[in-house]
Amino acid sequence: MNTITLTQPDDWHAHLRDGKALERTVPDLASQFHRAICMPNLVPPVKTVEEALAYRARIMAHVPEGVAFDPRMVLYLTDHTSPDEIQKIKHSEHVNAVKLYPAGATTNSANGVSDIRNVYAVLEQLEKYQIPLLLHGEVTHSHIDIFDREKRFLDEVLQPVIQQFSDLKIVLEHITTADAAQFVLAQGRKVAATITPQHLLFNRNDMLVGGIKPHFYCLPILKRQSHQTTLLEVATSGNPKFFLGTDSAPHAQDAKENACGCAGCYSAFTAIELYAQAFDQVGKIERLEGFSSHFGADFYGLPRNTQQITLVKEDFVIPESFDYLEDQKIIPLLAGKTLQWRKM
Ligand code: DOR
Ligand code: ZN
């Protein structure tokens, strides 16, 4: 197959940041996706519907002329989020979900939730109104090995939550392990997961063998190859519980190539080509459309897009870098490397 036409995809997990960063991130993401879940881990975080709508307006100001881009907004859950705020989401046209970051788990998560039991009253409202809870699924205790943090979250945090709130809609974001894939498979249809391009294309050897490659460093961290294999299996299985979420996360080159480098891979501009590469490598390119363009919309209860895009099997060289902020650069995922698929 040398060309493939897909319903226009959506990105159910993206970081656009704020201010001048939007000049880079919004056109890049809008060149690929119609809708995107815009993560709320700004400084300070997006905690109310009012703040989310103001953030959305700042994003919209950077959408290029003639491009139809529809940012879907998310509130950042804290120990102090009021259950009343959830009702406002239900009445909002543009806010679709709430994101739970365990405090300290990742970039800008200091205001996150310190113990999930602190927000059970909020979860009750989410369940009542059928608003998805998006999870960064890692525990944060310092004595727990970084490679085990996702699995421990499933056992210690998520299982009890599902027991208590069996009708709650949950997206386990950016899953990285076979344990998470199997956990999601074992739940009812209210529990789904996003998968990033980096976790389909790479494993920890790509990041660590032959020298540390900071542009592969993201959270949750890349795991061993057997986990990558299972993620590829479920992503390409046609099971609607698994859908596209890039977790594209811009960090300036200096902040990545640093003695204490930031977590995040930037894939906004080349995401669908990266996913096409991953699906084609296992002979499943025909399964890309469901994953990239149908299952996420269905889960969120939003209409599928009506526009289409076409990918052609032709070499595509990922740019070495992009300009970012005043005088900085972003190094995209797989900078300078050649992919076999290109969006027309
Ligand atoms: O690698 C990551 N980067 N993981 C996250 O959870 C957050 C993200 C960011 O905001 O930079
Ligand atoms: Zn993220």
Image: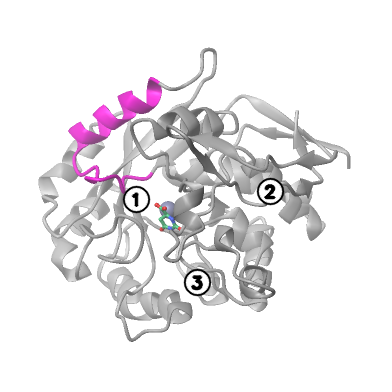
Q: Choose between 330 and 194: the one closer to the eye.
A: 330
Q: Residue at x 21, y 45 (%)?
A: 44
Amino acid tagged 1: Pro
Please state which of the two labelled residues, at mark 2 or mark 1, is closer to the viewer: 2
Q: Residue at x 28, y 70 (%)?
A: 161
**Callout 1: SS:** loop
**Callout 2: SS:** helix
62 magenta-colored = no
Please state which of the two labelled residues, at mark 1 or mark 3, is closer to the viewer: 3
- The residue beneath circle 2 is 274
For the image, the number of numbered tags is 3
- The residue beneath circle 3 is 180
Q: Residue at x 23, y 60 (%)?
A: 110
Q: CA distance from mark 2 to mark 1?
A: 27 Å
Amino acid tagged 2: Leu
Image quadrant where residue 50 sits: top left
Q: CA distance from mark 1 to mark 3?
A: 18 Å
Please determine whether, in this image, residue 119 is positioned above or below residue 318: below
- Left or right of 178 on screen, residue 56: left
Q: Residue 105, percent across and down?
A: 33, 66
Q: Which residues are magenta?
A: 39-61
- The residue beneath circle 1 is 132
Amino acid tagged 3: Ala
